[in-house]
Image (cartoon, rainbow, N blue to C red):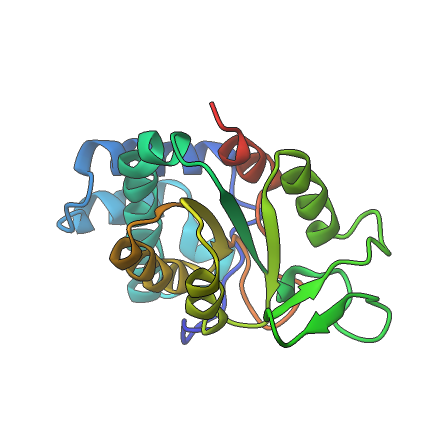
Amino acid sequence: MPYKFTFDLSRIPRFFFAELTRIGYEKRMHRKVGAALQDIIRKFKIQETTGLNLSDAIQLLEDLVDLEARNLLEREKFKRAGRRALLLPHCARKYMDNRCKAKFEPNIPSYICAHCSEDCLINKAVFLAEGEGYDVYILPGGSCVPKILKSKNYEGVIGVACGKELKLAGKVLESMGIAGQAVPLLKNGCSNTFFNMQTLQRILKKN
């Protein structure tokens, strides 16, 4: 969990993310968006809703803007990609104890979903992605990403993680010439993390 703070954006209205998308598109990878972000923090009462201080809120939103800009810039290349993979965080499993029947395969390294809980976010994501022809990995941490990518010949990768981990993974993908798409966590932490399934479903589509 690279952030030094925890956050939960799951209660923020969806229009907030549309506004972030607009900023990301207009600014692309430009970093001087502090004033605009402070405006959007006030508009959507991010500090009051999340409990984040202004500095942490700006850092989080800057990362989200950067990720959205990267998604836009990489989308066409990603759509042309052949073999694709989805990397999921194991902390989004419904259970983090023995109630989860997923088995960890250290040689991959990845958990293998056992589809034991229909309402588990990871189970739903695995079902969607495999239906679209993706290889799916449920990772215990970002350090597993290079090992998986070096052992496979993927042309496109979708990552689900917190913003900082996604930015680090983006650098790895760029160095390997792999098109990437990011789905940021809306709630971080060591368990019960959350991402938007509709966002994932939209990005999984190959058209």
Give 117 or 13, whichever is nearer the viewer.
117
Q: Position of residue 117 (x, y in %)?
A: 85, 54
> In the image, what residue occupies the spot 30% across and 38% down?
74
Q: How many marks?
A: 0
> In the image, what residue occupies the spot 64% across and 77% down?
106
> In the image, what residue occupies the spot 44% across and 52% down?
153
Asked which quadrant contains residue 54, the reply is bottom left
Q: Indicate left or right for 41 with 118 as reference.
A: left
> In the image, what residue occupies the spot 56% across and 69% down?
189
Q: Position of residue 1 (x, y in %)?
A: 48, 73
Give 16 or 127, whichever is nearer the viewer.
127
Vertically, is 38 above or below 198? Answer: below
Give 49 or 186, whichever is nearer the viewer.
186
Q: Residue furthest top?
A: 207
Q: Indicate left or right for 166 with 203 as reference.
A: left
Q: Position of residue 180 (x, y in %)?
A: 38, 46
Vertically, is 161 above or below 26? Answer: below
Q: Is residue 182 visible?
A: no
Asked which quadrant contains residue 53, the reply is bottom left
Q: Is residue 156 visible?
A: yes
Q: Indicate left or right for 139 with 47 as reference.
A: right
Give 86 or 82, whichever is nearer the viewer.
82
